[in-house]
Amino acid sequence: MAEADGKSTVLNGGSEEKEPGEDKHKDGDASGSKGQTQLSSNDAPTETEEAPGDKPMPDVEGQTGTNGEGEEEDDTDSMDGSGLYTLTEDGDRESESGKERGRDKDDGKRAARKRNRPSGGTNHSSSSDEDDDEDEEEEQKDDEDDDEAMEAWLGAELRDLRGPVWQAVPSLRSREIGKDSHQFVRRVCGARGLVQRLELQGRLDRHTGCVNTLHFNPSGTRLASGSDDLRVVIWDWAIRRAELEFDSGHKSNVFQAKFLPHSGDSTLAMCARDGQIRVAELSATQRCKNTKRVAQHKGAAHKLALEPDSPCSFLSAGEDAVVFGIDLRLDRPANKLVIVKEGDKKVGLYTIFVNPAKTHHFAVGGKDQYVRIYDQRKINENDNNGVLKKFCPSHLVSSESKTNITCLVYSHDGTELLASYNDEDIYLFDSNHSDGADYRRRYKGHRNNATVKGVNFYGPCSEFVVSGSDCGHIYLWDKYSARIVQFMEGDKGGVVNCLEPHPHLPGMATSGLDHDIKLWAPTAESPTTLKGLKEVMKKNKRERDEDSVRHGDQYDTQLLWFLMRHMRNRRSPRARREGAEADTDESWTSPDSSDEEEGGPDHVQCMSS
């Protein structure tokens, strides 16, 4: 039981310390959390004691700044001055209706168990009360076991949260006297305190289908969006007005639309489910002159990769495993760079990204577990299928589950690669490491199953990781510690797919199955309390575990099919002739061919509207 003397339950592996002034923000925490289930065993840690297995958080200077005259200054780049996060939120005591529903469900289970007992009945009221107590104890123990399992899973690879790198008052004073003023906005955009204060600012509503793509122009004044309605809209997002809307020319869901750099916002590249790569020419009078097809994949094309310094060249990747290099200066713009393979098997692609520091390098990911990096200057498909190096989490190398990479991105300086796996977690790799190197960080808690989910870095120096989730929420992790620092409700439709940070300001745009675009900015008066995070993550993990069981059952089915086919092939010619009428190979369909034709488990696709 959490009490006012500082005892608390911390799920992320740290100990929670009470800072001066905390009572002002969290008045009543102690009384409100009475009766909550302990996640650890008998005694919770006090301020001077560490919970078993928990790592103590270091005392970091800068969480409470002190000037030369001894005055204390509040640091806005922390959460109530502590910088630590607990998943037992203040909001737990406000969700009484949810608890009542849970109690009703538990009462029903207890009643069913009583009916199944031989001695159960109204004539034994005292024994019935004892049975109810036993049931409650069993349920409480189950809850404790679930919470302990969640705590162990989340805390396995977490690090201590670093101290804040930006302080509001000293930074404002420095800017007033002209000291480091050119770095002010850059540091503000990467401040944890502002990330903790992100909240919904407004919506852009124009599309009539799911919004699958968002992209700011280089200056950040315009936002392009594409949708299942086959239309592209150019927004003046600051005043929430659509400046231009046009038909993309695609025949199926628009998956991406991007401004080409240094083109004066006059050229927009697009790709879609129909496999076409199209380019739209925009006029200065807010008109679309035309759209033309410049390449064609033999399957859906999900992503484009821009070359940071080129207004006329970019890359595309498709489910046909082909990577095209496209140069708009040529009569035939499309040039096939590589067909991605693992051995002799083609690997369909969902994502591609160009290294911003080494623009001749690009990374791809798709229908297997490997991140592959290529060098455009020396792709030789006869030498390791042209791959420069590839990465994969070590535990997924020999995994039997059909794991896909739905999205990958380079960091701002090209030294790191972020990859999001379906029915798995998000992994951070060092792009400078040697071939086959394992991941450096792992980000947990979200759910990536229903769609081709995006992932991105947030902050001018890639300080944070941001992703949507099937639960309809937006997650932001501190990149270094892998701890969740922000958790927001995104789409009511249930899935958030696209996350586009603004290139110069602290904020971002998101979209998903809802037909609108949401704009987020750090305007909340107080930092997040991560309200509801604990229950949502428990649900996400439970659903993922259930999917793993289903995938295991599917593997058993395929193995059984293989064994039966093998046994039939080993039968003697006489037995085959005798049993030919009752047992023919034509009556069996390969699971692999079924998946290919019908879009089986390995065919992850964006949900249509």
Image: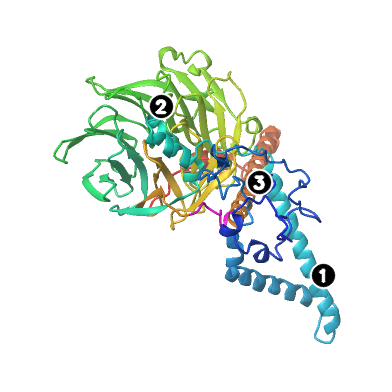
Q: Which element carries disc 3, helix, strand or loop?
A: loop
* Tag 3 and tag 2, C-beta contact below 8 Å: no
- Give the mark, 3 or 2, whose residue is nearer the N terminus: 3
- The x, y position of residue 290, in whole percent, is 18, 36
**Disc 1, SS:** helix
- Tell me if I can see residue 404 in this picture: no
Task: Nearest to the eye among marks 1 and 2: give it.
Answer: 1
Q: Is residue 566 above or below residue 117?
A: above
Residue 56 in the image, given as x and y percentages of width and height: 71, 41
Crowdedness near tag 3: few (<14), some (14–19) or many (≥20) residues, C-alpha within 10 Å = many
Q: Of marks 1 and 3, which one's residue comes earlier in the chain?
A: 3
Q: Which residue is mark 2?
A: 322
Residue marked by disc 1? 134
Magenta span: predominant SS is loop
Horizontal side of 521 relative to 591 (left or right) equals left
Separation of marks 1 and 3 at Cα, in angstroms: 31 Å
Q: Which residue is mark 3?
A: 12
Circle nearer the N terminus (1, 2) = 1
Q: Looking at the picture, which amino acid does disc 2 mark?
A: Val
| Residue range (magenta) | 526-533
Percent of width and height locating residue 552: 65, 44
Give the mark toward the camera: 1 or 3: 3
Which residue type does callout 3 highlight? Asn
Cα–Cα span, label 3 and label 2: 42 Å
Does residue 548 appear left or right of residue 52 in this picture?
left
Q: Residue at x 44, y 15 (%)?
A: 379
Can you see residue 461? yes
The residue positioned farthest toward the front in the image shown: 69
